[in-house]
Structure formats: structure tokens, C-alpha cells
Amino acid sequence: MSKLTRIGVVQTVPIKPESPRDDPELNPYSEQFNARKVRELTIEPNIAHFTQRLRRAGESGCDLVLLTEDTQGVSSWLFCGDRPEVQQAVAETIPGPTTDAFGAVAREFGMYIVAGLMEKDGEHIYNTAVLIGRDGGIVGKYHKTHLPLIEAAGVTAGDTFPVFDTDFGRVGMLVCYDWIFPEAAACIAAQGADMICVPTMAYGWSEDGGEATLKCRAADHSVVVAISTYPRQFWPGRSGIANRAGQIVADCGYDMDGMCFADVDVSAYRYDKFVQDLSISDLGGRLFLARRPEIYTPLTDPNSPANQTHSAKPHLQDRYDMAQVMKRVHEMWGYEGEK
């Protein structure tokens, strides 16, 4: 008999102060910068904002709730790699105040939570997805492995794809840009994941592309995929859930502050209600046994013909020049250099 797991996905926009670059106490390049004010105007309001939505999900009987990337709303401060003292003052450890607050709700309702937050671990800053257990404790965490350039200016990339056991199946996580790369989802699925959770700030390169990516990441490896993203004006939300067959079974649509739910048999691997041929109904098993990893070496060759072609393009060389990247970070904050 199948066992259904209720998955909830939150779609909302974290709270951020208007024009922080114009406030000397919020601008990381100002001598008056005050990390306490960032906490008062951004981190603490977001903890309350997301906790309220977690409680709504708990009251709806969720077994797992997925939140967005950077639930604290502080990523732009952490891109400032040339201001390590600001990074250390703004980022939190895991466990820390944000995971403690989310963990209290997880414990109250007996549910799992996946949340995106910016983490400090020693001298390093990571863009992290954390899995909180039904008891409110930390089950595990994942560090974003693929960083957009402006993020790479201050954030350290992860280099592993951990998968964690829950009482309904094995769960892996990706963060935002990661899910654009099919290899990342493949690495998680290869470790026996039943579900991939993706906190993110964006749905995809386009709305059609985001929907196709959600469906394909699920169907490619016969895993359940859930994505929680920010909605913006002229930018789709479309947070949702796809089952192992790549069918979208829950969708937040364009709601600026909403939630969607699906009851899914996460551990079910057969599609008997779709087809009768058992070699097709266990499609995930069939595809994994048909894989030929010994011939996929071009994917791991850093000097492949495509890599050589693209690395020689002047416009990409300029874009990947970290001095130019830091210049864009400075422009974002209105910083013109040391006087």
C-alpha cells in the first residue's frame, strides 16, 4: 500500500529595506555600517515572515515544507568579498538563530523543513540549503555548487551532493543556479535520492524554460522535485512540485504570496497506473541500469573542445575577470573606491 507524503511549497518575497545603498548604516562600504540594523530591518522580519508561513503549512498537515533561497534576505551583503568583516557580522552559523526559529515550528508540527540561507562556516560564506527534521534538529545541509559570477565574488562554492534519509525517503537539495545544470541533479539521483528540493530566487531563463526544467529534472531520474521561488512583477513565480513521471502536481502560479500542496508517494518507483510493461513502469531503475558512465568522460574533461572554444571568447574572458565582477558589486552599492 502506498504511503502519501504531504509536501508544501511556499512562494513569497523576503523582506528587504528600500535603497539600502543610500543608508550609511546599511551600506557595507560605509564607515557607519551597522550589522545590527541589517538584522533589525531584514533578518528578524524575515524570520517572522517565514515562520508565519511555516505555521500555515503545519496547520495544513505538511510532512515537508520547502522555503525559498536566502530566507534571511541578506545575500547582497555577502557578495562583498572584499568586506569579510561585514560578511562575518551578517551571516549566521548553522545551527543559529534562523534555524532555531524554523526548528521550533518543525518540532511543534512534526514536519521537515528545507530552507535556503546564507551561512558562515569559519572564514567561508556559503549559500546553503538546510534540512531540518521533525524534531527541530538539523538533519543535514548542502552548499550551492554553481555560483553566478556576482555571487562568486563573496561566496564559496560547495563541492559535494549529499543525500539524507528521512522517514518517507531520501532527500537531496540544490540551490537556484544549480538546477540549470542537469549534471547536478544526476549526481543527487545517482545516490538514490527519492526527492530533490530546490530553494531558488528564479524559475528559469524563461517561464517555459522553468516549467520544462522542473518536468525534466523529475522525469530524467524518476525523482520528485519541488521548487520554491520568488515571484516578482513581470517575473513568474510558478513554485511547484513534479512527480516522478515529470508531471506537475502542484503549482503556486503567479501568486505574490502563496503556498501549494501535493500528496505524493515519494518512495513509489513504479508507474503501473500508466503502463503495464514492468520494465517501463520502473523507469528510474531501467534508465539507471542502462547508463554508461564509462563513456561520459567528456562531461568531466576541463579541457574539452567546448570549454576551449568558450574560454577563448573575449566577452566571456571579460565577464569572468574577478576584477570586473567586483566592479559590478561596487556599482550595486554605489562604491567608488577608497578616497
Image (cartoon, helix red, strand yellow):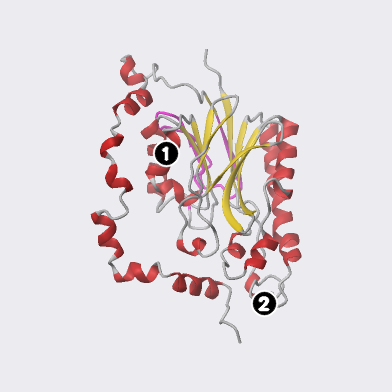
Q: Position of residue 250 (x, y in %)?
A: 51, 35
Amino acid carrying label 1: it is: Cys
Mark 2: give few (<14), some (14-19) or many (20+) Cα within 10 Å.
Answer: some
Label 2 to label 1: alpha-carbon separation = 42 Å
From the image, tell me which residue sits under label 1. 187
238 or 130, nearer to the observer: 130
- Residue 174 lies, with reference to residue 202, above or below; the image says above
Q: Residue at x 69, y 74 (%)?
A: 23
N-terminal label among 2 and 1? 2
* Nearest the eye: 278 or 316: 316
Residue 86 badge: none
Magenta range is: 236-262
Helix or strand or loop: what does disc 2 sit on?
Answer: loop
Q: Depth check: give the residue in front, 185 or 281.
A: 185
Residue at image point 49% right, 75% down: 327
Quadrant where the image shows the C terminus: bottom right
Q: Looking at the image, which residue is at 74% across and 49% down? A: 97
233 left or right of 271 in image: right
Q: Is residue 321 left or right of residue 128?
A: left
Relative vertical location of residue 251 with respect to residue 306 in this rendering, above or below: above
The residue where tag 2 is placed is 30
Whether 308 is among the magenta residues is no
Judged by depth in the image, the label closer to the viewer, 2 or 1, is 1
Where, by quadrant of the figure, is residue 77 drawn? bottom right
Amino acid at circle 2? Ser
**On the rendered structure, is 10 left or right of 271?**
right
Q: Residue at the location (25% across, 61% down)? A: 309
